Image (spheres, rainbow, N blue to C red):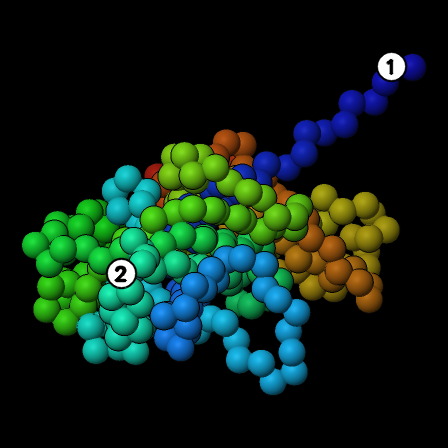
Amino acid sequence: MPPTTQPPAPRRPTPAQWGRTLAVGTVAGTLHLPREAHSCGHLDPFAPAPTARRGAEPRTQPYAVQHLTDAWGGLLLLVDDDSALHAHLRVLAADARWTGVPVVLDVLDVPPGQAALPRARLSVTGWVESILPADQRRVAQTAAAVRPLGALLDVGSTRSVWRLEVADVRVTTADGVHLVPEEEFTAAAPDPLYDDEDGLVAHLEANHRDALVGWVLDTLPAEDAQRTREVAVVGADRHGLDVLVTVGSGTTTLRASFAEPVRAPRDVVRALCGVFGCPCRATGPEGH
């Protein structure tokens, strides 16, 4: 009897792709800065923390932050000039012993509908550096070419951009923690579906429910198919869909892989038709 060939493992975003997807700023991040009380000491916020003592003051101060990337994949921070974050950055940047303010940028993936655990986490260690006033608008324009936020129009008047020089990039996925080389991180392309993932999932639930359930029942073993109670799409990326299925009293996640990676939102219809076996149209998801 010839050996049984195993089907190929479903394709998923690489750690570098996850990192770049979270870096473009669709989901707000948290910036951890050294506390001002330590700005005159020899603080290394990235060194291993000493054993915590009850009631000890945290070594860093967290701030919600809008982060972005420029046209070359470099990381930027968009900061309101009258915010506490801006004031804190200015105090720390005035410390002559630092060529940049040491920081950690933390970005947690938020799945559609909050129906599943986060799929990835980006943690960037590095140094924040100010950008000359004469260069603020030019840098903002490079960021707008990647993600055209209206707030970038205020750069130079009520907002400022700061550059985050990367020292270390780590991406956490279900497979563990991955140290991503900077050149691999900047070269990776962000996921083309992430910006409108919620809308795509809502469209699938509203317009393709029967096809989705049919695919699930065909994919599951017959015994599990008979005990299926609920079906929900909990993720969409360039390589496919994640479908959460309640079988009896338990749950399982199925992967519906596209035949080839989606490169732009306009390719979604053909990819979905390949999964569900429905006729393809040349329109976008909203018209299908």
Tell whether 203 sits left or right of 91: right
Q: Residue at x 85, y 18 (%)?
A: 3
Residue type at the position of mark 2: Ala
Q: Residue at x 63, y 53 (%)?
A: 243
Residue 169: x and y in percent read 48, 47
Tell whether 91 sits left or right of 218: left
Q: Residue at x 39, y 59 (%)?
A: 102
- Crowding near the residue tagged with mark 1, few <14, some 14–19, many ≥20 C-alpha atoms within 10 Å: few
Which of the pair 278/237 is nearer the observer? 237
Tell me which label, 1 or 2, sits earlier in the chain.
1
Which of the pair 258/179 is nearer the observer? 179
Q: Which residue is mark 2?
A: 96
Q: Secondary structure at mark 1?
A: loop
Q: Residue furthest left?
A: 134
Q: Quick check: 242 above or below 249? A: above
Residue 151: x and y in percent read 20, 65
Q: Which residue is mark 1?
A: 2
